[in-house]
Amino acid sequence: ARALGVDTYVPFRAAAFRSDGGQGQGSVVLSEQGAELRSRSLVVAPGAWLSSLSHTLFGLRIPTRVSAETVCYYRPQAESAGSTRGPVPDHSYRSMPVFIFQTENGCEGMSGMGYYGLPTIDVPGVKASAHYCGPTVHPDARPA
């Protein structure tokens, strides 16, 4: 995003949102610390805080379930000398798709949610996990 000229503010805890000028000219977001951010356009990406933040800022009720998940990252094996397996496939986001396999994953009350995987992006490994197997938690009180 920064390479495209986008300014990011992390961490930033939004407290309020309002129109800037009332003519569709932009937006103002106020932080809990009193800072103001002004922009022509705005992307709100609250993650686990979607339900509470969408209600606070926009008056929208969007029900979500936040769960504490265990995920694994699998490092692809490097090609070894004398290997007859051929070249190692590219596991980066440039070549490997996201995959979702919807099948019974054994998680109580979440029948058919399945498994998913992500290519190597920021961590040197392919991410894989079962969907929604962890306990329901509050986003501010997740286990360490």
Image (cartoon, rainbow, N blue to C red):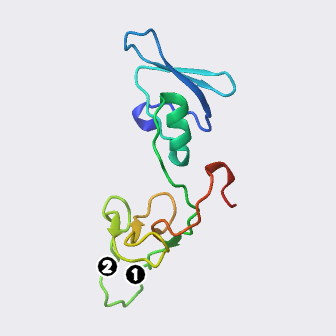
Quadrant of res 121: bottom left
Q: Nearer the viewer, residue 121 or 29?
A: 29
Residue at left offset 57%, top offset 33%: 9
Residue 87, labelled with which disc? 2
Quadrant of res 82: bottom left
**The N terminus: image quadrant:** top left
Q: Position of residue 114 (x, y in %)?
A: 39, 72
Label 2 secondary element: loop
| Residue 140, placed above or below residue 118 | above
Q: Position of residue 137 (x, y in %)?
A: 62, 57
Label 1 secondary element: loop
Q: Position of residue 109 (x, y in %)?
A: 47, 70
Q: Position of residue 48 (x, y in %)?
A: 54, 49
Left/right placement of residue 136 relative to residue 86 reads right
Whole-angstrom CA distance, mark 1 to mark 2, is 6 Å
Residue at left offset 62%, top offset 34%: 13
Left/right placement of residue 139 relative to residue 121 reads right
Residue 101, labelled with which disc? none
